[in-house]
């Protein structure tokens, strides 16, 4: 049972060390409120030692309830095997604890119950885990971005630990429901848009499954001289440049083209038809050029072919080929393979760039530089 707040001598426990005056009174007030809310003395001691006392209130908001469950209890309450639950947690990027360590809350039990319902609905385990891995990576990035945003927005000069702790707690209580609803909305939006451009014909229906591979067009666009730029710029300035690439890439794509991922100095775009992908590639290269001398030029490679979708990404020859074509493109240019050229020969202005042998690609590849036709 939690020790009563009046029974804890916080000063004797060493939890007020280093705090004087108003800072001491603010920490004492925060400690008393947390202890009164059921936080164990040992947890308070760890929080002070690790310099995260101000984060305990928001951590409790995000955890969802004071009652704690062991992994075994979560599995029992959700009606799911413990080993599969552990695989799910690992796929989400969560650290595993001992089976009898009570660290999980009612929200974890509810999530495990939803996992059981997914499996009962017929979603295969491999698909559940694949989605979990993608979700874990994406949410980790989103959490990092929001954590920094909230820290910058909700701290003020002269704040005490109590001020920041209560402000973070209030922000989390108010914002988390909105963020959760927004995530659901964005997922629905993208899923709806992608389904609009999907084809699911008789061959897939008769086989009882979706197509194993799809015909797609892939574009990679990367920054020219990014390695040298990294040596010259401070990390914060370099982050601004790569962040701007993400903004430009997002602005360049329109459905059915999708920005699949950003890989440091490169963006990967994918679409079911070559024309919209080429348009996006040309727009992106032009947008980078319009940034002026402070932004490095882009070069892009485009290829078409059959690829397999996995975990929101794509795998196959056109992906590898587009990546390799990008490495031989000139700054400010869009270079495409023969398949892309032949499909759209009359729609763009083309110039033959010769046949090149590309690393990891069998045989030579005929390449064409793409430009918009003069109006």
Image: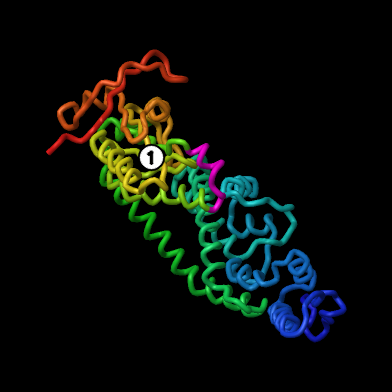
User: Picture quarter containing residue 20?
Assistant: bottom right
> In the displayed structure, does residue 212 sit left or right of residue 37?
left
Indicate the position of residue 269 as horizontal and vertical percent values.
36, 39
> In the displayed structure, does residue 203 sit left or right of residue 4?
left
Residue at 34% of width from left, 51% of height from top?
A: 190
Pick the front one: 264 or 58: 264
Residue at 47% of width from left, 52% of height from top?
A: 240
Pick the front one: 144 or 65: 144
Q: Residues within 10 Å of mark 1 (few under 14, many from 20)?
A: many
Per the image, is 137 magenta? no
Residue at 63% of width from left, 75% of height from top?
A: 165
How many numbered callouts?
Answer: 1
User: Picture quarter containing residue 278?
Assistant: top left
60 up-or-down from 144: above or below: below
Pick the front one: 180 or 107: 180
109 up-or-down from 358: above or below: below
Residue 329 shows up from this direction: yes
Residue 208 shows up from this direction: no
Pick the quarter of the image with the C terminus: top left
What coloring was used for the rendering? rainbow
Indicate the position of residue 107 as horizontal and vertical percent values.
57, 64
Q: In the rendered structure, which segment of residues is drawn in magenta?
A: 226-236
The local secondary structure at tag 1 comes to: loop
Indicate the position of residue 208 as horizontal and vertical percent values.
35, 34
* Residue sticking out furthest to the front: 293
* Residue sticking out furthest to the right: 12
Q: Which residue carries the number 1 mark?
A: 297
Indicate the position of residue 276 as horizontal and vertical percent values.
25, 39
Pick the quarter of the image with the N terminus: bottom right
Per the image, is 228 magenta? yes
């Amino acid at each position: 049972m939690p020790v009563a707040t009046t029974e804890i001598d916080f000063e004797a426990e060493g939890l007020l060390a280093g705090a004087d005056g108003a800072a001491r009174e603010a920490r004492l007030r925060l400690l008393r409120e947390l202890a009164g809310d059921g936080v164990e003395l040992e947890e308070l001691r760890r929080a002070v030692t690790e310099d995260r006392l101000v984060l305990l209130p928001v951590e409790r908001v995000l955890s969802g309830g004071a009652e704690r469950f062991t992994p075994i209890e979560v599995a029992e309450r959700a009606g799911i095997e413990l080993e599969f639950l552990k695989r799910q947690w690992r796929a989400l990027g969560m650290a595993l604890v001992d089976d009898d360590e009570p660290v999980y809350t009612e929200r974890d039990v509810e999530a495990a119950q939803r996992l059981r319902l997914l499996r009962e609905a017929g979603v295969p385990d491999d698909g559940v885990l694949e989605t979990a891995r993608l979700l874990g990576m994406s949410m980790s990035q989103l959490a990092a971005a929001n954590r920094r945003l909230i820290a910058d927005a909700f701290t003020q000069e002269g704040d005490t630990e109590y001020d920041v702790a209560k402000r973070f707690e209030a922000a989390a209580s108010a914002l988390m429901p909105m963020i959760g609803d927004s995530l659901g909305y964005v997922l629905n939006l993208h899923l709806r848009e992608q389904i609009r451009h999907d084809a699911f014909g008789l061959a897939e229906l008769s086989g009882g499954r979706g197509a194993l591979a799809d015909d797609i067009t892939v574009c990679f666009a990367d920054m020219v001289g990014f390695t040298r730029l990294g040596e010259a710029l401070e990390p914060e300035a370099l982050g601004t440049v790569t962040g701007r690439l993400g903004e430009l890439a997002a602005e360049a794509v329109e459905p059915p083209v999708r920005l699949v991922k950003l890989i440091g100095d490169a963006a990967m775009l994918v679409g079911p038809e070559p024309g919209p992908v080429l348009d996006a590639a040309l727009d992106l290269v032009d947008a980078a050029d319009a940034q002026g001398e402070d932004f490095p030029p882009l070069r892009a490679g485009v290829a078409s072919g059959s690829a397999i979708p996995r975990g929101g990404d794509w795998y196959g020859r056109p992906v590898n080929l587009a990546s390799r074509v990008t490495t031989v493109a000139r700054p400010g240019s869009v270079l495409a393979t023969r398949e892309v050229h032949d499909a759209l020969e009359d729609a763009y202005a083309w110039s033959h760039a010769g046949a090149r042998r590309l690393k990891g690609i069998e045989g030579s590849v005929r390449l064409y530089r793409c430009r918009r036709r003069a109006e």
